[in-house]
């Protein structure tokens, strides 16, 4: 015969073992880390976003300065 029954048993054991663990998705953590928000368009940015990227957003999207779009940045 084959090892079909053994494979099915192993899948069941692994499913039981991993049932208590949450998924390894980073999506929820990333959503929680979006704390920098543009005051004009309300687009969220990750907390690790640096000033040059925010400056690029404010000048390209809104033709405004970074201080106008992100008044709380760095405070």
Image (cartoon, rainbow, N blue to C red):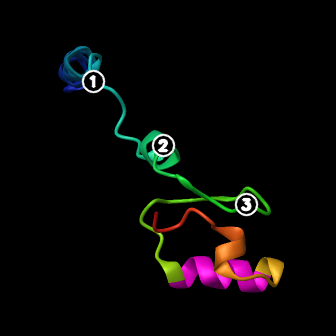
Specify few, some or many for label 1: CA neighbours under 10 Å numbering under 14, 14-19, or 20 or more: few
Q: How far apart, in angstroms, are the residues tagged by discs 3 and 1?
A: 38 Å
Q: In the rendered image, which residue does mark 2 sit on?
A: 32
Q: Residue at x 17, y 21 (%)?
A: 6
Q: Nearer the viewer, residue 2 or 12?
A: 12
Quadrant in the picture for the N terminus? top left
| Vertical arrangement, residue 63 with respect to residue 36, above or below | below
Q: Residue at x 52, y 52 (%)?
A: 35
Q: Nearer the viewer, residue 75 or 28?
A: 75
Q: Which numbered disc covers residue 21?
A: 1
Q: Report the side of 10 relative to 29 (left or right).
A: left
Q: Nearer the viewer, mark 1 or mark 2?
A: 2
Q: Which numbered disc covers residue 60?
A: none
Residue 13 drawn at (x, y percent): 19, 16
Q: Report the side of 58 relative to 24 (left or right).
A: right
Q: How far apart, in angstroms, are the residues tagged by discs 3 and 2?
A: 18 Å
Find the magenta span and give its range.
52-60
Q: Nearer the viewer, residue 33 or 6?
A: 33
Q: Nearer the viewer, mark 3 or mark 1?
A: 3
User: What SS does tag 2 mark?
Assistant: helix
Q: Which numbered disc covers residue 39?
A: 3
Residue 51 drawn at (x, y percent): 51, 79
């Amino acid at each position: 015969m084959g090892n079909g029954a053994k494979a099915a048993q192993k899948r069941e054991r692994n499913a039981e073992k991993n049932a208590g663990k949450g998924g390894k998705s980073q999506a929820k953590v990333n959503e929680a880390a979006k704390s920098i928000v543009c005051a004009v368009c309300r687009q969220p940015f990750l907390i690790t976003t640096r000033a040059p990227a925010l400056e690029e957003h404010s000048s390209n999207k809104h033709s405004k300065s970074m201080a106008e779009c992100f008044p709380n940045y760095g405070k």
